[in-house]
Amino acid sequence: MTRSNINLRQYVQPFVVGATLISLFFSVCGLILTAPPVYRGLGDFRQLYAAGYMVRTGQAAQLHDFAASDAVQDQVVGPAEGALPFNHLAVESLLYAPLTFLNYRAAYIAFLALNVALLVFACKLLLPYLMPLAEIWKFLPAAIFAAFLPVTLALAQGQDSILLLALLIAALRAFDRGTDLTAGILVGLTLFKFQYGLPVALLFLIWRRWRFLLGFAASAAAMVGTSLVLTGINGFFAYLHSLTEMSSSFSSTYGLRYGIHPNLMPNLRGLVQALALGPTPTAFHITAVLSLLVLIWAATRRPSLPLAVLAAILVSYHHLITDTTMVILPAALALTASLSSATNSRKDAVVALAALIFLVPALLLLAGVRFYLLAIPMLALCIVWDGFYSLPLATQPIIKDPSHN
């Protein structure tokens, strides 16, 4: 460890440890407050479990029928006001079908255990990139995962956000090894929430990474094809219709039906609609323009999967605080790269923005759950960070000596 690193550790470690413990405290509080209602059938896992049950019992064609879904939820989970429909690509329901051999509460515990295992797997995959953080505090790389409020909420709600994160980190490892095809396949598998995978694919199209796109297209075709087989044409069109109600045709009525609250969305849509005091046509057009500008800006950078993920989160039409677990990928790498690099004009800004992204969710929880404000440091990070980071030795691409054939 160099003298500069020793000095950095000496002065920064107390702040880092203190901030981590505070974030961990709020995360534990979030888990304690959120998990019990979900365990009783009053959370996100409710509709996911019911979707798995519908597929297992031959009712897949009605997956996106609100009335049918509501009736099944009441049957297999229990009556509840404000039950939400299943609004993901139908193929995801296959993940939950085996869990429905258990009763709801046992299935919730089993899926929680699976999510914890996925989180540990994701942490181990990203760990080689985060070793400079361990020089500040040896537990900091793990704390980024464990003390991040969106991770806790994803675990408590029984959401699929941890799976998204694991797939994207695995795709990063493949991309940095030069296996673009595998990286594209893995990103394509995230299309059960396609609002993230499609912007990433668009950027890689602009960057002309053809093997990535080939892999993405292959897994995307499998995901969409499987969904069509499950629901049939009519069921698939019902799903497409629901997407318009959640996005371009959004209203307060549809917000209640689908449980959509833009002020809880840490993306451009949430930020603009909160500032515009509602889903007005003006807010919709401003969001569209800003989203286009973010994609254009990202497209002018060198190809970077973390940067593409950050841009995809910002421009996503539908985003939950639980899905903000994905921001660990770009924010942690930006933070690590800045701490590892020589001093430059952007270094301090990147460190501050990455730290804000990790700490702000817990603070916003106390400030009336204004999660839309998290979009501000995310947008700023997208602008000031050029997408570069140091590759761990294990993922360094092999460069052949041009003097040898």
Image (tube, helix red, strand yellow):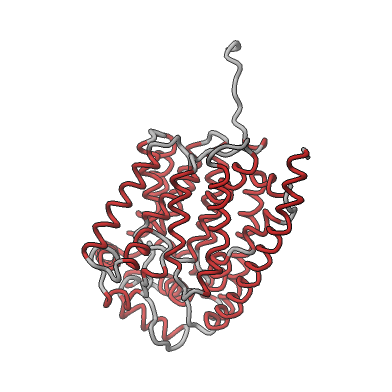
Q: How many marks?
A: 0
- 187 or 226, which is in the foreground? 187
Q: Where does residue 387 sit, x and y in percent of width and height?
A: 50, 40
Looking at the image, residue 387 lies above or below residue 121: above
Place of residue 37 in the rendered image (x, y in percent of width and height, measured from the top left): 53, 83
Outermost residue, left direction?
A: 281
Which sits in the foreground, 304 or 48? Answer: 304
Q: Residue at x 61, y 79 (%)?
A: 32
> In this rendering, would 382 be left or right of 329?
left
Q: From the viewer's perspective, is 184 left or right of 139?
A: left
The quadrant holding residue 193 is bottom left
Q: Is residue 63 above or below residue 311?
A: below
Outermost residue, bottom direction? 79
Image coordinates of residue 126 in percent, x first then y, are 62, 48
Question: Compared with residue 73, is residue 386 higher up or lower down, i.e. above or below?
Answer: above
* Residue drawn at point x = 35 percent, y = 37 percent: 206
Q: Nearer the viewer, residue 359 or 195?
A: 359
Q: Residue at x 59, y 48 (%)?
A: 335
